[in-house]
């Protein structure tokens, strides 16, 4: 069907099937809260919009993926993304064996496997290549020791994909490998991290003599940095999705209509400027999705999107607080006439770290300066 017919089809189905109680929640729904919806999407065949159809995906064009995302926003689907769908699945399609794809992809789609991402460490965040988690060969297994941190919803995931150091003598980018690990493996300990909002989306994960079969490695030993860069590109296109800023702008519009703020020319000008910038970013996003769809890797230009969208997200959050008057910066919830409610401070909490995780804005600017503008280090 053409794009407009596709939009109407998605809209009608979501209006009929998206649970009323999940619309516009005060903060992001976690894996457990969203699992029923995940299973409904799976029954429809709509879990993985960007995957090829032969592997259970929707096979959507980049523009149709934007349409699908916009229609989810329209019904208020505010859910932590599935790392199996957005990150691991595309990586296995590009680098996994046939056996790994047959083992893991169907379980991602069904929700049997809930994945978290084991990348950052206490001394290796934006400088990810400095990671120290070790994986040493012992017969048919690797013995894994170390710590990961800022692992989103590790407390609910039953699988984790890891970057580990398999050669301590090699240059730091050269000695890294990629492992898939069940979270119930003996020796894994998860500790939640409470954020400023008083809830836990992050965790730190400790590995003490954790035994992992060597067959759980994706790609060749010591070649994980190539895949890490591919996944960082996938992560940055996820974190650089215009949805990050567009969804809260949609909530701001509902609140502004409630309070009559569009009668204020200063507010209207600030809102319109942000709206235009976000729509511009959609065009860039579609171009980068098309690169991935062709099976090619994104280069350093992905940093432009991550940098621009996360900083736009913060400007939207700032305007939300400015417009929220006595509700700003408090735990108050604003009831809206459309039957939903909105807690402005939660958007602010989400926006502040967005320019840090996935590679800080400073790191993105360095990448662009060196790799695109060819400036000296």
Image: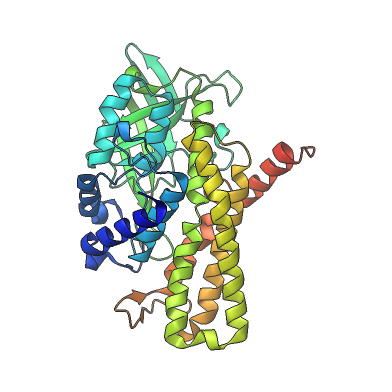
Rendered location of residue 201, percent (x, y): 37, 54
**In the image, residue 202 above or below residue 71:** above
Q: Residue 23's quadrant in the figure?
A: bottom left
Identified at 50% across, 43% down, the residue is: 289
- Residue 149, percent from left and from top: 44, 44
Whether residue 158 is visible to the viewer of this picture, yes or no, is: no
At a point 48% along the width and 31% down the height, the residue shown is 295
**Where's the C terminus, which quadrant?**
top right
Q: Which residue is pictured at 37% across the width and 50% down the height?
A: 81
Query: Residue 349 location, x and y as percent?
Result: 47, 65
Q: Is residue 249 left or right of residue 363?
A: left
Reply above or below: 162 against 46: above
318 left or right, relative to 346: right
In the image, residue 235 sits, relative to residue 361, either above or below, namely above
Residue 255 location, quadrant: bottom left
- Which residue is outermost to the right? 376
Residue 353 or residue 134, whichever sits in front: 353
Residue 306 in the image: state x and y as whole percent. Answer: 57, 50
Q: Is residue 126 left or right of residue 247?
A: right
Image label count: 0
Tell me where residue 123 sits by quadrant.
top right
Figure check: 165 above or below 17: above
Q: Please state which of residues 282 and 303 is positioned toward the viewer in this rendering.
A: 282
Can I make out residue 237 in this image? yes
Q: Residue at x 61, y 55 (%)?
A: 308
Q: Nearer the viewer, residue 319 or 192?
A: 319
Question: What colouring style does the render use?
Answer: rainbow
Residue 42 is left or right of residue 160, and the answer is: left
């Amino acid at each position: 069907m053409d794009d407009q017919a596709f939009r109407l089809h998605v809209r009608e189905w979501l209006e009929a099937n998206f649970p009323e109680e999940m619309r516009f929640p005060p903060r992001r729904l976690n894996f457990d809260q969203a699992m029923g919806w995940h299973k409904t999407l799976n029954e429809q065949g709509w879990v993985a919009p960007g995957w090829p159809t032969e592997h259970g995906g929707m096979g959507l064009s980049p523009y149709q993926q934007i349409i699908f995302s916009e229609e989810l926003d329209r019904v208020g689907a505010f859910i932590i993304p599935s790392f199996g769908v957005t990150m691991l699945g595309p990586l296995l399609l590009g680098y996994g064996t046939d056996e790994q794809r047959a083992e893991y992809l169907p379980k991602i789609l069904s929700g049997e496997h809930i994945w978290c991402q084991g990348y950052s460490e206490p001394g290796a965040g934006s400088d990810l290549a400095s990671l120290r988690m070790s994986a040493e060969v012992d017969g048919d297994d690797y013995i894994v020791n170390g710590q990961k941190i800022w692992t989103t919803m590790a407390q609910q995931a039953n699988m984790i994909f890891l970057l580990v150091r398999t050669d301590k003598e090699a240059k730091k980018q050269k000695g890294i490998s990629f492992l898939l690990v069940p979270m119930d493996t003996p020796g894994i300990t998860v500790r939640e991290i409470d954020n400023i909002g008083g809830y836990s989306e992050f965790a730190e994960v400790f590995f003490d003599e954790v035994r992992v079969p060597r067959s759980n490695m994706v790609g060749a030993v010591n070649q994980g940095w190539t895949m890490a860069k591919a996944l960082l590109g996938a992560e940055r296109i996820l974190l650089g999705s215009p949805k990050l800023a567009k969804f809260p702008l949609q909530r701001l519009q509902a609140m502004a209509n409630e309070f009559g703020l569009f009668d204020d020319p200063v507010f209207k000008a600030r809102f319109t400027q942000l709206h235009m910038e976000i729509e511009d970013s959609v065009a860039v996003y579609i171009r980068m999705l098309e690169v991935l769809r062709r099976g090619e890797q994104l280069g350093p230009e992905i940093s432009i999107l991550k940098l621009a969208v996360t900083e736009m997200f913060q400007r939207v959050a700032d305007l939300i607080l400015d417009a929220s008057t006595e509700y700003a910066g408090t735990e108050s919830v604003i009831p809206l006439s459309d039957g939903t409610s909105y807690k402005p401070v939660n958007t602010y909490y989400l926006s502040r770290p967005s320019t840090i995780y996935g590679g800080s804005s400073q790191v993105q600017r360095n990448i662009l300066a060196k790799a695109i503008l060819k400036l000296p280090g």
